[in-house]
Image (cartoon, helix red, strand yellow):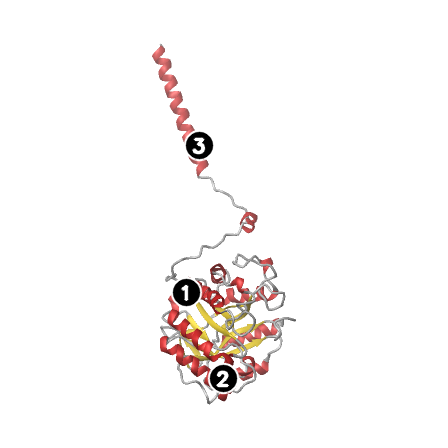
Amino acid sequence: MFKKYEVTIIVFLISIILLSCGTSNTESTSPVIVTETSVEEIPTTPTVPTDPNTDDTVVSLHGQLHIEGTKILDQNNNEVQLRGMSFFWSQWIGEFYTPQTVLWLKEDWQCTIVRAAMAVEDSEGYITNPETEKNKVFTVIDAAIAEGIYVIVDWHSHHAEDYEEQATTFFSEVAQKYGDRPNIIYEIYNEPLDVSWDNVLKPYHEAVLAEIRKYDPDNIVVCGTRNWSQNVDDVIGNKIDDENVAYTLHYYATTHKQELRDTAQEALDNNIALFVTEFGTTDASGDGFIDIQEANTWWEFLDENKISWCNWSIADKDESSAALIPNSSTTGNWNASDLTQSGTMVREELKSKNPQF
């Protein structure tokens, strides 16, 4: 009698255990619901890699770039058009020169290129503070290489002919340090003023270029042109003797319209390769009204001619051309509310045109 009850109790206990196990498994496989609000309110800080990414990046796809005629071609002789963002003057808003910002621009904005604008003669620039400014620029270069995107190393000056020796020293160091990397594009004079192409600019470019070519025979060099890098037609019939040189074209859409596009077209018709290393959606001051129609017309022109570009600028300065509102994060993770009208426009253009890597 006692054994009969004992067996019954044991069977009952086993049934309870099996039932509870089944219930536990069902609960463990139930989906965890994450609301949209929770995702928006808790931004994820991207992890900055310590080693270069070699798979599925724009640089692994295109590799070493070179120029043929007016086009940039890749390692397989396919035409390439790069689109991305320029940083602001390094000495004034250099806090954005971070690996995290480069990573965010690559992943969220889909930039295939960034531009590090090394301040030169202005207050606290390279001439008076070389190591500090170099470190900022090298940080951006290292991050671009790590992320597998291209990077313009820009000598951001309006009077570079007065600092040829310093430019030669700087670009010699860059070429020795990074010249074996296909990511590098040299911009050896941002925006000359109204000085002669034949007598001032071309000799300056040739001197700096010769130093670069001692250590880097392959990477593209972009040379500034007269009158804020707009008179690209000056180069017609008097190009620099180097196969991998392009010439700088800058514009600000509200100020510079069809007349400048006609000048650019004349240069293209004469086999002059152009690179828009800087442009704005605003007027030439970097502030003021944004001409959306002209901005779109310029983008159409650049796309038709496969001209690469960088927008001015990743900065939180209180002006229309800045991509960010004041006090924005210096490490990316920007929400829509952190972007200015220009920043929103340019990000949308980048994401609609650039591939996602």
Name the residue at 52% across, 45% down: 34
Q: Which residue is mark 2?
A: 201
Dot in front, 1 or 3: 1
* Residue at x 56%, y 71% (from the top left corner): 123
> Which residue has dot 1 on it?
145
The Cα–Cα distance between marks 2 and 3, rounded to whole angstroms, is 79 Å
Along the line of sight, the residue nearer the viewer: 226 or 177? 177
Question: How far is disc 1 from disc 3 in space, using C-alphas?
Answer: 52 Å
Front residue (pair 194, 343):
194
Name the N-terminal-most of marks 2 and 3. 3
Q: Is residue 334 left or right of residue 48?
A: right
Q: Residues within 10 Å of mark 2 (few under 14, many from 20)?
A: some
Residue 63 point in image, percent of width and height: 37, 70
The quadrant of the rendering that contains the N terminus is: top left
- Quarter of the image where one finds residue 287: bottom right
Residue drawn at (46%, 71%), measured in percent from left and top? Answer: 152
Q: Earlier in the sequence, mark 2 or mark 1?
A: 1
Quadrant including the C terminus? bottom left
Q: Residue furthest front?
A: 128
In the rendered image, which quarter is residue 145 located in? bottom left
Left or right: residue 165 compared with residue 55: right
Residue furthest out toward the left = 3
Amino acid type, residue under disc 3 in the picture: Thr
Is 65 in front, or is 265?
65
x and y percent of residue 74 in the render? Answer: 39, 73
| Residue 213 position in % (x across, y down) | 38, 78
Going from the N terminus, do you reach mark 1 or mark 3 first?
A: 3
Question: Closest to the observer: 116 or 310?
Answer: 116
Q: Type of residue at label 2?
A: Leu
Distance between mark 2 and mark 1 Cα atoms: 30 Å
- Circle number at residue 23: 3
